[in-house]
Amino acid sequence: MLRRIVLVVVLASLASSAQALDGDSVAGKNIFQRICQNCHSAEIGINKVGPSLWNIVGRQPAAVPDYAYSEGMKRNNAPWTTAALDAYIADPRGDVHGVKMYFKGLADAKERADVVAYLSTLK
Ligand code: HEC
């Protein structure tokens, strides 16, 4: 009996952690507007303090024309997969990416998944 309860608890927590990786693009849009939009536009061709994030998922880093990226970002050759975006947003000032994005990052994995889900809609 106890073993069964333990199993149910483990399965329930697995289910909720799996769910946390499934981003909700509507919630993500909200987070984007609240946080990212201070520095980023979701529209093509509009750069603010940061480059436009239109069509970001799948593209090469530092690919927006007319935007002055940091040397660190220009050296970053790995395409912006959803996993790469997740890692960057978690710690934008980490070693891999240079230091130009003065943003402390989103610590909450669910919020990051939501934002990345929203970014995936910008096509
Ligand atoms: C305080 C301003 C600021 C905030 C807030 C901010 N960013 Fe940025 N972001 C920047 C700057 C500046 C760059 C350029 C970085 C570089 O060149 O090193 C950048 C770069 C990026 C890039 C790389 C773009 C490319 O073309 O390769 C992504 C992706 C990104 N930001 C996502 C986000 C997301 C998602 C959020 C919200 C969770 C966010 N940023 C919040 C300023 C900001």
Image (cartoon, rainbow, N blue to C red):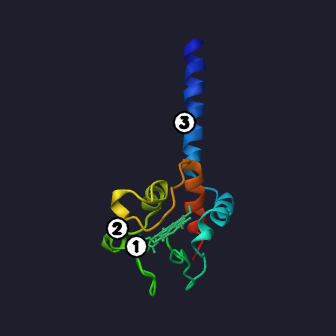
Residue 76 sits in which quadrant? bottom left
| Residue mark closest to the camera, 1 vs 3 | 1
Residue 99 appears at what percent x and percent y?
A: 40, 64
From the image, tell me which residue sits under label 1: 61
Of callouts 1 and 2, the N-terminal one: 1
Q: Amino acid at mark 2?
A: Ala
Considering the image in quadrants, where does the N terminus appear? top right
Whole-percent x and y of residue 43?
60, 80
Q: In this rendering, would 62 be left or right of 54? A: left
The one nearer the camera, 14 or 67, is 67
Q: Position of residue 104 (x, y in %)?
A: 51, 56
Instruction: Locate residue 53 relative to residue 81 in the image: left or right.
Output: right
Q: Residues within 10 Å of mark 3 (few under 14, many from 20)?
A: few
- Of circles 2 and 3, the one toward us is 2
Query: Splitting the image into 4 quarters, where does residue 15 fall?
Result: top right
Q: Which residue is mark 2?
A: 78
| Mark 1 CB lies closer than 8 A to ligand 1 | yes
Occupied quadrant, residue 40: bottom right
Mark closer to the chain start, 2 or 3 = 3
Q: Is mark 3 within 8 Å of ligand 1?
A: no
Could you classify mark 2 by the number of other residues whose Cα lies within 10 Å: few (under 14), some (14-19), or many (20 or more)? few
Image quarter hosting the C terminus = bottom right
Q: Which amino acid lies under the numbered mark 1 shown in the image of this protein?
A: Pro
Q: CA distance from mark 1 to mark 3?
A: 33 Å
Query: Residues at badges 1 and 2 in contact (C-beta under 8 Å)?
Result: yes
Amino acid type indicated by mark 3: Leu
Name the secondary structure under disc 3.
Answer: helix
